[in-house]
Every structure is written in structure tokens, then in C-alpha cells.
Amino acid sequence: MAILGMVALVASILGLVFWQNSGTPGHSPALANFGVPFKLATTKGGELDSQTLKGKPYGIFFGFAHCPEVCPTTLFEMSAALKELGDDAKDFRLLFITIDPERDTLPVIKDYLANFDPRIEGLVPTLEQLPIIAKGFHIYYKKEPTSDGSYTMDHTATLLLMNRKGEFARTISFEEGRATRVAKLKLLLADQ
Amino acid sequence: MKTVTQFAFALALTFGAIFSANPSQAHEIKLGDLVIHHPWIKQPPGNATVAGGYTKIDNKGKEDDTLLSVAVEGVHTVMIHEMKMEGDVMKMNELKDGLNIPAGKSVELKPKSYHLMLMGLKSAYMEGEQVKGTFTFAKAGKVDVDFEVVAPGVDMPMKH
């Protein structure tokens, strides 16, 4: 009887723990599961394993170097926002993942990012890795042929912010101005 | 050369916001009933081989005209594109038949909208550099213009 009582008690505690976990505001299981683990070649040398990112907040932006507007503007605005935050954002990393690995080799991306904030790091997936990571982060991309026989890319222009636990926290859209970017980064950095 | 360019870009990153408050002198080019305002190119990052070109064209005439093509010195291909946001997706649409400039109206080529897509830059641009180009219209014909290279992060050097 005593054993049965213990089992019931343990079961109810476990139940309570699970109930609490699933009920934590702002951390619904769907959002916590957003994204996929990845291991991608990085401009900082070697591969970046997403497991090593835990404990520090980071941002992810998918773009490409032949991008005339959205990508340079996003990188420029984020560089300015990070400069403004200074040491407060010293642990923050922004991962720029190319959706055009055919043209964007590591040296191309490294040079492309050379003048932006050093907290911005370029990741180059293989053609096999790209669809998996894009799908995992709900990123749309599509090659659009141009009349000169070349191509450009349509793509999701939203930047994703991930918290210290590696969970999706919030987005920064292309249209949002610098003050909003800084405010959202501050919220992310304050989130323990 | 690359180092110099990168240094210039870094400077532009640092001072872009300051420069943007002092727009460079706007210039106008007249061609028949058309007025082309201050063509400019946004300085692209690092080794980028593409850049966006912008301007504003007034049609003071009674007939529509069409911007058929643009050539820029030292650039392999220039296309007329429309950028559209569909939800959070950025889409590029090439205007293969050119850009209509309606009678009595102004059409602005600006970031996040119609723009010239310069593809295959032969050398990196420096902020403040003048780049020669040619606009070709269906009715008004051809005109030579100078594009000014503007710091990255500047959206609107023309303040009217």
C-alpha cells in the first residue's frame, strides 16, 4: 500500500512537472522545437556545430552575395545595431547562411562579410544540407532565372533571433528600423 | 586595391549615417519631356559583383514612354527589376519589356521597389565615384548620365 502510495505521489509530481513545462508562457513546445540542429562550414574556420551555440543568444539570416538590396541592407543595419549595443551584445552572434552555395563559396562569403561587424559569421551549407536547414527554419528560397542566362534568388527576408536555450525567440523583419532592431536585440539579451 | 576599397567601405559603414544627412548635390538630366533625377548606385559590400542602381524619372509629356534598357560602364549586364515583398519573402521580378513611365507622372527607382540590377561589376565601387551610363527610352531615345556611388545604408540621397 505504501509502495502504491509512493508510485502515485511520484506520478503526480511528474505530471505536475510536465504540465508546468508545457504551460510556460512564451515557450510553447512548437516554438521550442523550431529549427534544426546543424553543422555547417563557417567563415571562422572549420565547421560550426549548432550544439555549441547553446548558452548564448544568436541570430540567423538566410541570404546570398549576389543580392542587391535585402542582404546588404540587413547586414548593414545589424552591424549598426550591434555597434550601438557594443559590449552588451558581446556574446551575440549573427549567422549569415547562404542560400546560393553554388556561387557563394567560403572565400566569397568571407570577403563579402569582411567589412561588417565581426560578430557576423558566414555559413556555407552544401547543396545537400541547404534544403534541410532551410526547411528546418521555415525559410523559402527559389532560383529565378534572369534574361542574361544567370539567376537571382527569391528568399525569406526575415531575420530569426534564437535565445540562450537555442529556442526561437522572435523575428526582425526587413522593414523594421534601427530602433526596433536594437530594442528586439536588447530583449533577447535580457532573456535569461 | 581591395584593401583600399574595404577600408573605404568600413569608413562608409561608420560615417554613412552622417553623410546621409548631407545629401550630395542632386543633378537632373533632361531628355525631351523626360527629367531624370540624380542617378545613383549603392556601394555594395566587399567583393560583391552586383549592385542596385536608382533614379527618379518624371514624364512631363502627354504620352507614356518606356525605359527599355540601361547600360553602365564597367558592368556586364544591367536589368530593370521590381522588388516586391510577399509576406516575409523578397521576390525579384525582371521587367523584360521595360518600365512604363506614364504621361504626367513620376516613377521612382528606389530601394525596396523598382531598381536597376547591375550584374557583373568589373571593379569595386568607391563612395563618391562617378560612373557613366546610358538610359534608352522607347520614344525619347538615348541619353548619357552619370551615376553617383553612395555609401551603403543610405536609402534616399535625394531629398526634395
Image (tube, coloured by chain):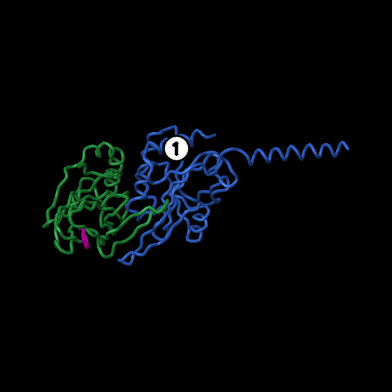
Q: Name the spot of residue A37 as percent of width and height, x first.
A: 55, 50
Q: Nearer the viewer, residue B76 or B71?
A: B71
Q: Is residue B30 above or below residue B136?
A: above
* Residue A117 x, y percent position in the rendering: 38, 41
Q: Quadrant of residue A4?
A: top right
Camera-side residue of B102 and A24: B102
The disc labelled 1 sits on which kind of residue? Lys
Horizontal and vertical percent position of residue A69: 33, 51
| SS at circle 1 | helix
Residue B25 visible in the snapshot? yes
Q: Nearer the viewer, residue B67 or B51?
A: B67
Measuring 39% from the left and 52% from the top, which residue is drawn there? A109
Q: In the rendered structure, which segment of residues is drawn in magenta?
A: B66-72
| Residue that protrudes farthest toward the right in the picture | A1
The chain in green: B
For image coordinates 15% across by 53% down, the residue present is B35
- Magenta segment, principal secondary structure? strand
For the N terminus of chain A, give its image quadrant.
top right
For residue A125, side relative to residue A117 (left or right): right
Where does label 1 land, which residue?
A184
A117, above or below B143, in the image? above
Q: Which corner quadrant of the image does residue A66 belong to?
A: bottom left
Would residue B90 appear left or right of A190 to someone viewing this image? left
Q: Tell me, what hue is chain A?
A: blue
Q: Quadrant of the C terminus of chain A?
A: top right
Magenta stretch: includes residue B89? no
